[in-house]
Image (cartoon, rainbow, N blue to C red):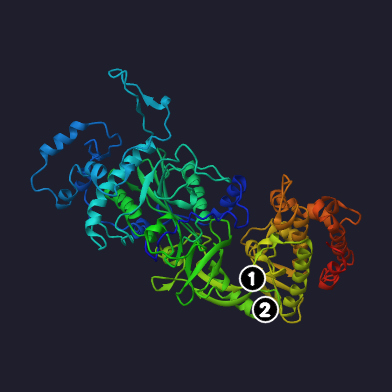
Amino acid sequence: MMSTSTSGILPTVSSSSAFPTCRLQPCMDNLLQNDLVGNVLWEETDLPATTSSLMDHIIPKSSIRRPVIENITYATGVLIFVDHKWQLDKHQNKQMLKQKQKQAPDDTDSDTEELGTDCEGSSVSGQEGSSASAAPDASDQGWDSQEYDPNQPNRKPTPKQTPEQKWVCLFNTVYTAMRMTYRAMFPHHSPMYPFEPADHKRPHQQWSPEFCNAPIPDVTNIQKPDVVLLDRDVQPKSWAHVLTCIEITESDLGTNHDIPLFKGVITKGYLMMREQPWRRFIMLFSLAANHLRAHYMDHSGLIITRPILITANPMRLVDMLNTMSLGNNKSHGMDPTIHMCNKSCKQTQCEVGDQAIGWIEDKEKQKLLIIAILWRSQGLFSHGTICYHVWDKDGVEYALKDCWVDEAKKDHEEKVLEMVRGIPNVVTLIATWDVEYEGEPDSTLRIHNRHRKFSPEFRCKYHQRMLLTPCGEPLSTFSTKRELISAFRDLVVTHKAMTERKVLHRDLSPNNLIIYKGCGFFIDFDHAQIIVQCNISVRAWGTISSSSKGTSPYMSICLLRYLHSASKLTDKDLVMMGQTASDDLESLFYIFVEFVTTYDGLHGKIIYPKTEQWADLLEDIGSRAVSYKSGLLLVKRDEELMNCTMAYFGQLKYLVQEWHLKFLQAVEESCESGIHHKDIEEGPREMDIS
């Protein structure tokens, strides 16, 4: 489909094996609601009217004028735009075409002559590579939605078109007409097509209404986008294949920002970013009461552009359709330094071999083969972290971490990894670099800085990559119980060595631990901090949200209590929080508990799934997590954790209780530093584990 720059970024290879598990709709709604606070900028209300719109940057204005649009017709001969109105019914007002032709002067606009009044009909019926979607899609229509013609009783009823199908018919009619002159000019820029041209002469995209009544398949969320732009060669279709969406409503988004369309666009953008985490940004559109808006999302926030009335300015709707369907995939936010294969690759010279699913550029701009997606983060405005299993040209395997880092912490993880270099069971940094876009380090400031005004919580994010070794597997892929216990012991010993080098991880969860050749390894030092000389803890000033580091289901009771008491403060209040090695060790304990109370066998096997897993339960109960964990950990004779241990791990329930009692002892003795590494690192060795 494309050449080796932005080509084929929509993979058919499933990445559903990448963890963590995708959030279900209630959790997703919460996540999005929290992400939106302070991260949304509305151009029409938050910016002066004289400020240029982001729409004009991403969708450049063309030389197309109204007469060109007024001379485009459906295959039926009906004009698509008449008397300042978009004609959505291709079977009405056929006489208007004849009247228009009689009144038309002989010296028509040159662009009009190129397109011709019947260009859409000839293109659909005879032009090579034309889009079949210029005709309405009736795949979701039943007999109850079809019209009966009393003049032709024996003829099958004519299917009724939904509003979404009518808009799609119009969009694809514009696409077919515009593509004719686009192909003649390709690959050169022109005033009619000012966007960067695609890597191919015949684009494979099509506008489709196929999901307006039937949701796009997804186990976590039911969403029915009105209109989607898809690669028509890829089957089956999912959120991994959606290039953009257009949501349509008669309601006015300008007078009411809380209409369902707004939340719907956000949710669809999240699902696209979740399934296509290699995109630099997501661009969606809404047509609310004939007002066109772009909804731009990246890892620093959301911008809703100033509305354009498409009846008064039809050229801008056509500009948008042309840029999205005919332009380079950079317009969709695709990263030209990465390529994810799809079926269209068979039509290009993309040679990644049978084992690879794509390629990604390294520091020297050489291609590393992507073998698998290991992990991807969740959340709309986050670090956008995705980890790949990659091979270099010699077949040496690495883990590659691709992320968007806060400007203030741009070099932080690199510094920490240098401090722990050489410690066994800690990943080793091979190389780190800024990802470049158009010759400059890529950052979210490239777009947001055009307004010179930001959303309240805006934070600039820089696009970085790290090449690391070894490339392990999730800790849950343990092959024996002994291997799992040995891996946890490795982690305790290694954690002690890291603290001796004055590094505290501060964000332990199953996602930040791997297993490699039977050994446990620490990864992901984004939130690690350096312990000041002569101290036993790290302390940091900041707001509540910035000071609290860790994944809540695995945070220590002490930190959860702190967060609960601090929750009465506003997020603008400066607070100080201290964390010790004991907090990290308690997190390791909770991870161990989750494993032995969840898995029924090797490699993370679950035969009898529980209604709620450890992480889900702790997230759901929110502030009550303090009392819940205290009841499990700080009651001397309580054996609930032992009783919850799965039968497969029956031998380990006494180890769980032993670890539990160690924490209780540290609390009873009011030990300031909490539990020590030596208190737990020897225990697993003494057990007979088969």
Residue displayed at 63% across by 68% down: 524
Tell me if residue 622 can be seen.
yes
> Residue beneath label 1, please?
525
**Coordinates of residue 11 in the picture (x, y in percent):** 47, 56
Of residues 26 and 497, the one nearer the viewer is 497
> In this rendering, is residue 195 above or below 219?
below
Residue displayed at 91% across by 54% down: 637
Quadrant of the image containing the N terminus: bottom left
**Coordinates of residue 114 in the picture (x, y in percent):** 17, 51
Q: Residues within 10 Å of mark 1 (few under 14, many from 20)?
A: many
Q: Amino acid at mark 1?
A: Phe
Q: Are marks 1 and 2 in contact (CB under 8 Å)?
A: yes
Tell me if residue 259 can be seen.
no
**Coordinates of residue 631 in the picture (x, y in percent):** 83, 53
**Coordinates of residue 412 in the picture (x, y in percent):** 59, 75
> Residue beneath label 2, please?
420
Of residues 493 and 619, the one nearer the viewer is 493
Q: Residues within 10 Å of mark 2 (few under 14, many from 20)?
A: many
Quadrant of res 163: top left
Label 2 sits on a secondary structure element that is loop
> In this rendering, is residue 486 above or below 22?
below
Q: Which mark is residue 236?
A: none
